[in-house]
Amino acid sequence: MPSNRWGVFGQDSYLEFDVFALITISPRGIRSVLVVGIIAFLAIGSIIIIDPGPQQVLPDQILSPGPDAAEDQVIEIENPLLEREGKAGGILTLANRGDPPAGFDTMRTSSIALHHVAGALFGPGNLVMRCRENIYIVCPYLAKSWSANQAFTEWTFILRTDIQWHDGVKFTPEDVKFWLDMAVWGAISGDRRRAPAYFEGDLGVESVEVIPPDQVRIRLDGPNRFFPDVLANPRLKIAHPRHLMEDRIANGEISISPLDVGLVGLGPFRFSNYEPGSIIQVTRFDQYFERDAEGIQLPYLDGIDYVIMPDPLAMDIAFRTGRLDGGARGFGHYLSEERLVGYNRDLGDDFFVGQIEGGTIRLAFNVLKDGPWQDVRVRRAMALWIDKDAAIPAVLGGFGWTSPDISPNNPLKDKRFVIWPKFDLAPLEEKRGEALILMREAGFESGFSMGHLCRARHLASCQFLKDQLAGLGVDLILQIVDEGEWNRARTSLDFDSQQGSLSVLPIPEGTEGVYGRYSRSPDAYSKHEDVRLDRFYADLRDASTTNQRIEIWQDLQRYIFVEQTYIIPIAEATYVVPYRSYVMGVVFPPEDGHTHTDFATVWLDK
Amino acid sequence: MVITTFIASVIIFIIMRTLPGDIVGWILSGGGEAVHSAEVREALRNELGLNDPFALQYLRWAYSMLTGGFGGKSLANGQQISDMVARQFPVTLLLASYASVLSVVIAVPLAAISALRWNRWPDYLVRLVTIPGQAIPNFLLALLFLLGLVMIFRWSPPIVYTNPWEDSWNHVQIVFLPVILLAWESSSHITRVTRVHILEVMNEDYILLARAKGLPEQHVVLSHALRNALVPTITILGLQFGTLLSGTLILESIFGLPGLGRALIQAALVRDFPVIQTLVTILVFLILTLNLIIDVMYGILDPRIHLSRSSYTVGLHIPRGGRNLSESH
């Protein structure tokens, strides 16, 4: 038999197929085919009779829903509660940059790895919060109202009475006093002492008094008209239930953390599960007190899964394949233009990004250390020389703007208080010419070398500064350090210059820790002991109007950035966070990625 | 072994204390995101016991280790280190075990084929596969594989690790790629080492004798050549296993595996002294144990090697009946 033929029914009676030629059928083959055909017909007919299979769906049946379906449809349109049903439910899956440090203790750390989760667990604020619609305004949260005495040294907060901790215990003014006392003074048990909160210096609290049944009076160590603005810092979350911690601290557990007491908080979601290095799960807290504008209880979601993803590329891949609904907040995880290309290619319109203004790249001098940079002309020359626009693609992944050269015109970037002064607006060539003159006048026309503390994870910005300043004859010697050493070194006087990395509060008073004198704040970007800065901040605190504040703030910036050039601000990053298009209701703060991480208003449209 | 572990723990302690850096700054600034005062920093250092004398800090840690506390709590996240080890060690152990088993399964036959077909196309092919396995960093391959999967299949592995006894299918999906990559790297090394040893052994007199006695080639290779060539392979395998236990850091990060390597490096970066101290001591102990097991296996695989109390000795083993080693072949 030729190889291109297949036979059926044996050699004598076969149906022969020729794949290249016509089919050849013998007479006995025809009979066989007929028999098989009849058997097959009968068999198929039997099957049809016995099992009619899926019923054909007629168009009428689709267009004419039954009475139940019609009723559902009517309710969905007329009953606003069903609008809530539409928003309710579902688990949001987000990436988280890492495990929350310090046992989720908001008094210990402001790490975004904690605060991305802590908003859901502990709420978006404390007694007050930044408003969801405008972060520059203070809104009530656990307190429903507040007032100050005439000297602005005493603030009295009236608390809501419908708030419960996640374990069902009522929230009281004693909880506030316990939290504030521990934040400001720490705790003592025997010979052991708990350190105060890292933010204790921002508060300026002298004492806290409970006024039964629902008030708390906070006395300050000086007048502060803007105390609620300070208190609205989203890092100041109440994560310390008195009824679970007080006795244990008294028994010697002074380092007790929220994790040690089961992460019992006041936020819209309650703790469900934590697998370190893997996942944090929270579920809706049914007794949460906040309601939306229509009076519907928040949160909408059933829960949130925060997947620990230290690697940004792993996050990208998981997002692009649909395993994540949203990205992580935190430097390194925010998207760059290059990474966004991959998102666009894979997802098209199936995702969107939120933009949050973030940290600044800068060069700050240690003028307490000997070197050419002690001469203000040298510092000013370096400020004029650096091509700040070039930093945006080179360092910030394409998302950012120069600051404070150009005022951000986008209304979303209106900082209310931070009206950017327009410094150094001349063309680059002109500025560089002036820089060379200044260097010559200072006697350093042939250049010099200067050390630079370089955080390993910020290598790109270090290299950018080195490359830029090489043209001026300044040899920036990069002293690259890991996280552990960076955290020590940046508060020391061991280095000639550094960048710093700390975010500051979006209010002028919040900048003293990074612009002020070294002896007052070792974390200051520039190490100096210029007492004039003390006066600026004292004036800010004494200001009685917003315009006055803005005026002082602008003078302060001119002094520190131009007249003294202790710090060269270069460019400010725009943080870009991706979410899938069905994730609705995310509140993006215009700046400060720690804000509004409660996700209480988020719902899934899928 | 106990003395070596103790000495290692002292050395680790001294190294960590002499390294510049400070976990307190990392905790308080949240990785550089908040300002704090020098007073608060000092208060927290006191609270965490970092200002205590070094000897006291070491003794406190050692006491905790000896009483089953595994060094107490992590300074970075407040978790009990014993809990961390209990959670993370199985992840790394499973990963290392899968990769090691797969490496041996792949490497030994490839090495045999490569050696027996020396300088012929099977040998070239094996070399072509194993050299990139040794040369290309596995994290780069991991990213390439993942990106390839995303671009071609719109698929990526699961992002939440589960143990095999909890959700075996999820476990397989999440460990599949890292195991393949680790096994490729590890087996490449083992293949090349084993191949060289097989080539050496094949030129030994006893192989010639075995062939002269008319033994089938398969028997000569499997029973005589391979068995002897595998002794150094066992050493390599042990070392590779030790490396896998502590060296899967980047793959663990990329694939979301909450293992020991990732925890160790994270702890080292932020100077979480008790965690580093405990994890490294455990790893030292494990690697010493592995070495001991390997030494015992030497004796089983090659009776000429004796384990003595003072040192390891190698000599010609004369079995009962007076036949020497050559005769036994």
Image (cartoon, grey):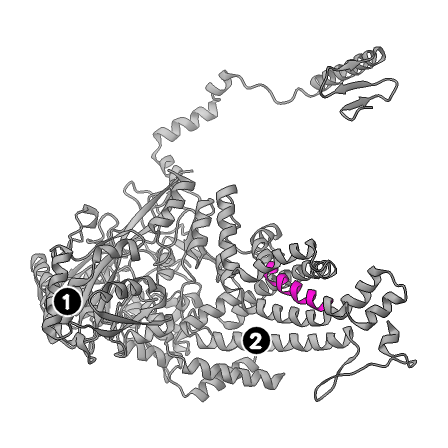
Mark 1: few/some/many CA within 10 Å (<14, 14-19, 20+): many
Q: Chain of mark 1?
A: A
**What amino acid is labelled 2 in the image?**
Ile
Q: Is residue B197 magenta?
A: yes
Q: Is residue A542 magenta?
A: no
Q: Which residue is at 70% across, 89% downward?
A: B310
Name above or below for residue A589 compared with residue A78: below
Q: Please state the horizontal and vertical placement of residue A27, each as a whole percent of the image.
A: 84, 10
Q: Please state the horizontal and vertical placement of residue A280, each as a whole percent of the image.
A: 45, 57
Q: Which residue is at 53% across, 82% downward?
A: B9
Q: Nearer the viewer, residue A33 or A232?
A: A33
Question: Would you say residue B326 is visible in this rendering?
Answer: yes
Q: Nearer the viewer, residue A71 or A61?
A: A61
Name above or below for residue A323 compared with residue B262: above
Picture quadrant of residue A332? bottom left
Image mark for residue A381: 1
Q: Disc 2 on helix, strand or loop?
A: helix
Label count reads 2
Q: Going by the picture, which residue comes out furthest to the front?
A: B119
Q: Please state the horizontal and vertical placement of residue A283, each as a whole percent of the image.
A: 44, 52
Q: Going by the picture, which residue comes out furthest to the right?
A: B321
Q: Which residue is at 39% across, 29% downward?
A: A75
Verify CB contact (< 8 Å) between mark 2 and mark 1: no
Q: Is residue A417 left or right of residue B117?
A: left
Q: Which residue is at 25% across, 71% downward?
A: A475
Q: Disc 1 on helix, strand or loop?
A: helix
| Residue with the mark numbered 2 | B282
Mark 2: few/some/many CA within 10 Å (<14, 14-19, 20+): some
Stretch of the chain drawn in magenta: B183-198
